[in-house]
Structures are given as structure tokens and as C-alpha cells.
Amino acid sequence: MADSLEALHGQQLLELLAVVSAYPDEDSAVHGAVERAAQALEAEVAAVVFGSEVTACIGFPAGAVPVADLLEVTRQERAHLEVPGLGRTHAVSTGWGGSHPGHLVLARWAEEFSVEERHLMRGMARLLELTLTMLRTLQAEHAMRERSERQAAENAELVATLRQRQRLMEHLFEVQRAISRRRPLPQILDMITNAAADLLGAGIVGLWLRDSAEPDELRLAASVGLRPDQQEQRSGVRLVETGAAGEAVLVEDVVVRYGRLPEAALLHRLTNGRLRAAMAAPVYDSGEVAGSLLIGSGQATRRYASADVQMLRSFAEHVSLALTDANTVEQMRRAFHDSLTGLASRGLFLDQLSQLLTQATPLTAGPDRVAVLFVDLDRFKAVNDTLGHAAGDNLLICTADRLKAQLRSSDVAARLGGDEFAVLLTGVENTEDAVLVAQRILHALAEPMLIAGRQLRVNASIGIALSPRGTADAADLMRRADVAMYQAKRAGRGRYEVFSDGMLITGAEDLPDRTG
């Protein structure tokens, strides 16, 4: 549920970004954002307030917008609005700062806004602020360009500069959009290096990143104008061998170098000796220097001005943004999913189990219990010992696939670690419901698996535990399923057992706690 809600909110933010970024001016973007925010949160009233002025508003008749009431909502002095035809509605506001601070106000009749919806509102407000800032910048650049073109004879150089700056903004806006849409990282890095080559007139561009295993080495992640036949450009090379690129990493600042490189230098070989001027800026991943972005020229007379340095810094900052975003997404994925099988992680499984157990029992009749199946493969260690860990990993992946195939979309399968799996069944009425699923799983896992060129049969032992009505202890329920699983192993393996209180006197209660 948490993952699906986050995915929905993420999609709504992307849709809002697509809507507002499509408008050519600030006013239409604000009105579009108001309409989209109201639609996303099912609100009858939506407004954007700048200072003491309501810039855009829907939900009130024309000429009857209660400006004073809306301002009180932005100051947290009012939590309700009276809407003609609806009466008293729940109102909430979220603001943003910067050079043009404002507030997004929403109100609806049906129900109060949840914590998650308030988080979504803050994300919408932040996206609106960023988009309006971008539009104001582009509009200012456009206005300056028009003025300069009227004086083209005197300001030809200024016009060229402004056009370049506008192209820079357009490139960076496209990069930001690609990041927000979670395009593949290599694709984004190629976008940045190509844009840098275009705007800086650089025939040579290289994005060097630190090797995670060898921090004193760099590898070329994206490039323009470097020799593709040099295999070493894709492998790790020492910092000192990458010229200005390595220096920028070491000093964590922009480095500019002019002149011909020694023939033995790596960049000399990668550029066929063409490099005469180079400039590099450090890039970061989550605040730590992660490499550098280098641009170069084959012109001996090329000199880099302060505007070139600032442009290079802008591209380097967007590389840092892309790296940090990709790293954050990967960390979130690893935190909630098992890296080998793709199943839910132990933490995600226990979190969802706890949430289900703490929910109030429905007033209507129907299945309302939760069941946990603790699944442990039989003789998995023998496969690992005889066929190797690669075969063991393939066996775990195959097991996960067969496990998922026996479940409904509302159920959750997780890998707890090693050869231990768990299944969370919702909407269970009695023990028989859980037993049927366990039987299907045993049957599926009993079918031969093609592992390391062999047809292997690997059974499983399953422990079943149903939540007592009114319980809210996830650890206790997991413990019961674990005890039942060990009882199944003692009884011969390749079978299931349903937990009963009598099992606690057989010695299973002395098992180590593996539910946390």
C-alpha cells in the first residue's frame, strides 16, 4: 500500500510538472496548476496566493472570491472555508519562499486532508515554484533578447550571449525534465555531455567518475570526441593520469590548463594529440566528490572566460543532481526490495504486516484476518555446497518466481534472508484459506527446476500462523509461523504445519528470534 501510494503521488507530481511546464507564461501556468491540483486531490476549491493577492482561483463564483478568508488560511488562522452550494469545507495551505513567495490553498467538502496528501501538496507547491522561476527566467531572457535585437548594430555580442544563455536554460530544463521522469542515468549523462559540447564549442568532452572499488581511479562514463578504439577509456585509470579531470577531483574546484600534453598522457592518446586547452569541474554524488566534467579544445588560441567557467559549473551541477537522484532511487529500491529476487525486503514485509494488524476490524461481515506463511527451502545448503553459489542464487530466483505465481495481487511475498521466504495473506477467513495457498506453493516448488544444467527437486517446509482477532503484534505472529515451520521440518519436511499453542512446549520456543 505504501509503495502504491508513493507511486501514485509520484505520478501526480510528474503530471503536474508536465501540465505547468507546457504553458508559455506564468499566468497560464498558475491557472493550469490550480486546476490540476484540485483534480489530483479531489478538491472543490483551489487557489494560488501571492502576498495579499489571489492570482488564480476556482470553486467560487466570478467576483465572489473571499480574498480575506483565503489569506487567513495561508496564515494558518482558519482551517475552513464557506463555499456557496457546499457550506463548510476543510481548507489547507502550503507555501514556498524564494524571491516570489506564495501559497497553494485547497479546500474540499468530503473529508480532511491526510498527512500523505499534505506531503503531496508540498511537492506540488515546490514544483510550481521551480516552474514559475524557470518561466520568469526564460521570459526575462526573451525580453532582453528582443530589446537587444532592436539595437543589433551596437549589441551584436550581447545578443549572441543572451541566445547562448537561453540555449543553456533550455538544455538544463530538458535535463531536469529527464531527471524528474527518471530516464536511465547513462542517457541523462550523454545529454549533458552533448549539451556541453554544443554550448561551449568543445570538440572534446569527458565525464569521468570515480571507481566505487578504487576511489583513486576514474572511469569515463560519457564522452564526445574521444577515440572509441582506446579500451582504457572505459576502465579505471589513476587520477594523476587524467590531467585536468583528475586535478579537479583532488582540489574540488574548477581547473583550467593550456598547452600540449605529453605524448605519454592518457588524454593525449584519447584525443590523438589534438588537446590544446582543457577545463574541468568536480561533480558530486550525495555531497561527496564523485568525479569531474572536462571540456577541451584543439585550438591553441582558445581561452576560457568567466562565462565559460560558470556554464561548465552549471553542467557539472546537473551531473551531480542526476547522480544523487539515481543513487537515492537505488537506495530506496534496495531498502524495500531484495536485490536478488526482487521480492519485498524483510523491513517492507514487517512494515506492511504491522500496518494490517493495527487496522481496526471492519464492522461489516467478511474475511478480515491476516495469515503469515514462513517458507524455508529443504536441502538448499546441499545445492550451494555441491553446485556453487551461482546455482544457489538461480534456485532462489526460481523459487521467488514460483512463489509469486501462487499469490493474489493483494498478497505480499518477501525474502527474509538466505533460503527463508515469507508470505502475507490478507482477507483470510479461516485456517483452510491459508492451507490452500500453502498446498499450492508446495506443489509448485516440488516441480523440477533447471539449475546449472540439472533438473533439481527442492521441497520446502512451511509454517502457517493466523492473526488472532484484535492482535497488533507483528513479531509475535512471525514467531508463531517460524515455530510452525520448524515443526514441519521435524515432521519430515516437504510439508506444512499450522501453529498451535501446543508447539510452544516442544522446544521450538527456544529458536532464535529472526523476526526483527
Image (cartoon, rainbow, N blue to C red):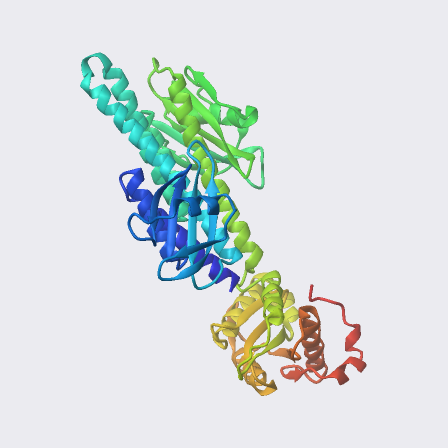
Left or right: 394 with respect to 200?
right
**Residue 148 visible at all:** yes
Residue 179 quadrant: top left
The picture places residue 291, in percent across and down from the top left corner, at 51, 33
The picture places residue 503, in percent across and down from the top left corner, at 75, 82
**Residue 229 visible at all:** no
Residue 203 quadrant: top left
Q: How many marks?
A: 0
Q: Is residue 457 above or below residue 33?
A: below
Residue 467 quadrant: bottom right
Q: Is residue 161 above or below residue 137?
A: above
The front one of 63 and 167 is 63
Q: Quadrant of the C terminus?
A: bottom right
Q: Is residue 335 above or below residue 368?
A: above
The picture places residue 423, in percent across and down from the top left corner, at 58, 73
Left or right: 430 with respect to 108?
right
The front one of 163 and 249 is 163
Q: Is residue 440 above or below residue 295?
A: below
The front one of 88 and 49 is 88
Residue at 69 percent across and 79 percent down: it is 484
The front one of 281 and 491 is 281
Residue at 52 percent across and 78 percent down: it is 448
